[in-house]
Amino acid sequence: MSLITVIAKEKYCCVMSDGRVVDQETGEVKKEDLQKFINYDNRAFIAYAGGKEMCDIILNDIAEVKTYDFDLWLKAFQQLFDRYQLKDLYLIDQMRYKVSLLFGGRNEKGEIEIYSISSITGAVEHYLPQNDQVAVTFLCSENVGDGSKVMDFLGEKLTNGGHQTPSQALSTMKLTNTFVSDVDWSVGKKTFRMVIK
């Protein structure tokens, strides 16, 4: 799988991904340096985790970005999940494909807005941090359980290290990536990051 982490406040949004790609069938590490998000003019992003082949298909089916209305992005992804029957873990060549996405950035009103959508649960989460609120979300494999240990670790590091600046958030995200990679072999230590202000 992967670890994708997003920390967002009213004035910034930080995105971090690990770079490891694993063959879901054999468990072989195929790559260590894949940036698992697309950067749209340092204003918006789409980050992805799950079966790389299906993620590539979904992302290739998304037309060129002409709007920063993230509600429309959500509807487009939901339609693609339906088209490929991902909510039912559609079998392609006898493999179960899972796709999880985090996306957002500065919307058309200039606000930081984040969405996540998962073919595994069908769940959609939405974040629009205001004032001093902090939105924290991530995608990771079930190798680390239900994610509560990751969220506890993130929360503790944000409390101790702060989150007033993007550099503080990125430091916490890097520590979290190291923590997860130590318990989940499918997450690599090499990371890629993006900051939207």
Image (tube, rainbow, N blue to C red):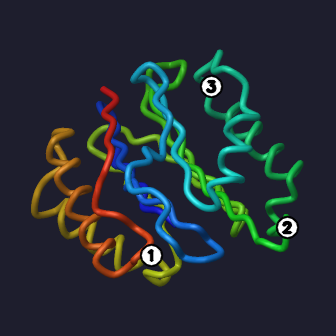
Residue type beneath disc 2: Asp
| Residue mark closest to the camera, 3 vs 1 | 1
196 relative position to 165: left or right? right
Residue sitting at 65 percent across and 59 percent down?
118
Q: Distance between the residues labelled 3 and 1?
A: 29 Å
Q: In this view, does 69 lie above or below 16?
A: above
- Residue that badge 2 annotates: 93
Q: What element carries label 2?
A: loop
Q: Provide residue 160's location: percent of width, then percent of height.
A: 10, 63
Residue sitting at 49 percent across and 24 percent down?
40
- Residue 143 visible in the current orientation: yes
Q: Provide residue 88's location: percent of width, then percent of height.
A: 84, 68
- Residue that badge 3 annotates: 69
Q: Provide residue 103's location: percent of width, then percent of height.
A: 54, 41
Q: In which quarter of the image is residue 137?
A: bottom left
Residue type beneath disc 1: Gly
Q: Provide residue 73's location: percent of width, then percent of height.
A: 68, 34
Q: Distance between the residues labelled 2 and 3?
A: 35 Å
